Amino acid sequence: MSKNCINFSSETYTGSEKSPLGLGYSPNPEFIGKIMLGKDKKPYMVKDSGSNSKKWVKFQINIDNLPHDCYHEAKLPITTKISADEETGLEEKIGGHKPFFVKGDTWPSMCGKSLTFFGQFKNSTNENILTQVFVNTYGDEGTDYEINDIELNNDNKKNQVIITNSDLENSILFDAHKITGYHIHTELKPLSFLYERLSMPENYYFKQKYYDSKYYPYEYIKLNGTSIHSQYPGQSFNLIQFRECSSLPFQWGDCGFAHVKKNKYDRYYFTWDCY
């Protein structure tokens, strides 16, 4: 016995159709490219069938075997804990007591309160550039920050000075975890990029496949890759990602993530979010 479609009463369905039509959804009022699960629990997409009509077509995609440009690499740090006496100031590290400073530098602060040193990383293609991250951990944490690039050239090394943070009332000193190398992790680019690259509308089916993929973006400290955000995972490109872990025991809100990124003017900015 035929019934009127839920979304288009002038069309009917029997309920035996495997596509979303079997659930009462005609393709004709839907936009081309819309994806829905059919009665057989498989995904279907609306396609143009000519003569001003549309049809449901079975949709198949293997998110772990997309075109090469749908993936990129993130660097996951390999670390070893070192003492303050072992720090030279020149090493890549998470946390630490001794950032790389040269004559004339001062410990970054805002309104007379010291910022916390979160680490320094070779995030550039230039191995002689260290990107240093200082963020406030007092008051409304994460609102004040200073992110600097400093070059490891001979002149700077000759003029290196050791400056330590003495304002422990307003900031934190993390133990140093020297970065001795990186694991390279292949991960999916942001969801927004993939929808555009694959000419696909946003849809729950593909989003769930993204979360379940073996190439889902890494959730802890990393350089580059795809940023993980608490509410909308996999939504933007990443430079440096922070999350509470054994080498950096600082929690951004309730299970949150923090990120260093660059804006359209190629300037660093800092952001964080939590569940």
Image (spheres, grey):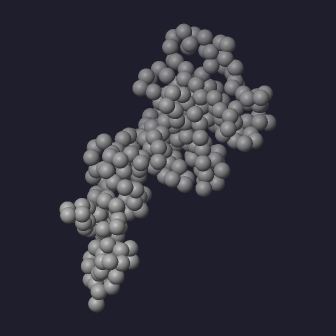
- Give the percent coordinates (x, y) of residue 79: 51, 38
Vertical placement of 44 versus 103: above or below? below
Q: Residue furthest bottom?
A: 1
Residue 212: quadrant of the picture: bottom left
Q: Residue at x 29, y 81 (%)?
A: 13
Number of numbered markers: 0
Residue placed most toward the observer, 245 or 177: 245
- In the image: residue 126, left or right of residue 230: left
- Give the percent coordinates (x, y) of residue 163: 69, 21
* Quadrant of the frame with the C terminus: bottom right
Q: Residue furthest left?
A: 50
Q: Residue at x 70, y 32 (%)?
A: 115
* Quadrant of the frame with the N terminus: bottom left
Q: Residue at x 30, y 69 (%)?
A: 27
Q: Residue at x 43, y 41 (%)?
A: 225
Residue placed most toward the observer, 34 or 72: 34
Residue placed most toward the observer, 44 or 81: 44
Q: Is residue 96 visible?
A: no
Q: Is residue 228 visible?
A: yes
- Give the percent coordinates (x, y) of residue 69: 30, 42
- Give the percent coordinates (x, y) of residue 108: 69, 26
